[in-house]
Image (cartoon, rainbow, N blue to C red):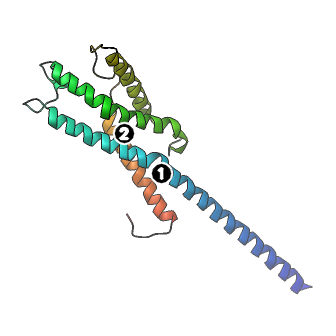
């Protein structure tokens, strides 16, 4: 009789251990699947877009700087018509499509954020894009009174956010995959 009770007890303990281990593995797989989506659908594309936009803007500034190295938009002498036309070209072909893609990532994939609430710089990004979209429509109508968005672009905060989020998720992915020494 004792042998039967011990056998049943061991079988029950084995079942519970197997169940708990299966549950732990399923939770780990779910966490890894979410993390992979965060990297592939949000933080990876956001990082690529912010880096591309930053490098393009740097190239624009270098190419179009005034003799003292400053931008025409932060200079005592207002931008010339040629400088403004060049700015509109870059905005319409490079910067606006990039920031619209960033905004679309935020809107479409807000469920993949690491934070429980929307970070303020992402809301500022969305507002900045809206401000440029109305400016771009005015340009297509021939009105060139405005050349900047009414909301500033959170470039440094956004770049830091994308870099840090991507790096944190890659570290967690490495940990969940059981890889050691990969940074």
Q: Nearer the viewer, residue 178 or 54?
A: 54
Estimate how packed mark 2 is, as few (under 14), some (14 to 19) or many (20 or more) residues with alpha carbons within 10 Å: many
Proximity of marks 1 and 2: CB atoms separated by less than 8 Å:
no
Mark identifier at residue 158: 2
Residue name at image x 73 percent, y 67 percent: 19
Question: Looking at the picture, how far across and down is residue 27, in whole percent?
Answer: 63, 59
* Circle count: 2
Q: What distance separates the C-alpha of mark 1 from that of mark 2?
A: 18 Å
Numbered disc 1: secondary structure:
helix
Please, which residue is most extreme toward the right here? 1
Residue 135, image quadrant: top left
- Left or right, 81 with respect to 174, comes to left
Residue 9's x, y, as percent? Answer: 82, 77
Q: Is residue 67 above or below residue 15?
A: above
Residue shown at 55% from the left, 58% from the top: 32
Circle number at residue 40: 1
- Position of 50 with respect to 89 (left or right) is right
């Amino acid at each position: 009789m004792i042998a039967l009770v011990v056998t049943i007890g061991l079988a029950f303990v084995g079942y519970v251990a197997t169940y708990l281990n299966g549950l732990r593995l399923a939770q780990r797989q779910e966490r890894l699947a979410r993390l992979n989506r965060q990297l592939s659908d949000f933080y990876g594309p956001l990082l690529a877009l912010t880096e591309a936009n930053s490098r393009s803007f740097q190239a624009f500034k270098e190419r179009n700087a005034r003799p003292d190295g400053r931008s025409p938009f932060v200079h005592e002498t207002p931008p010339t018509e040629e400088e403004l036309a060049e700015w509109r070209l870059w905005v319409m072909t490079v910067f606006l499509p990039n920031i619209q893609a960033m905004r679309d990532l935020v809107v479409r994939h807000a469920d993949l954020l690491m934070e429980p609430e929307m970070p303020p710089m992402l809301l500022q990004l969305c507002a900045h894009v809206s401000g440029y979209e109305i400016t771009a429509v005015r340009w297509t109508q021939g009105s060139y009174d405005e050349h900047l968005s009414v909301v500033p672009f959170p470039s440094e905060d956004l770049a830091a956010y994308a870099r840090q989020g991507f790096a944190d998720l890659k570290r967690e992915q490495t940990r969940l995959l059981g890889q050691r020494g990969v940074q």
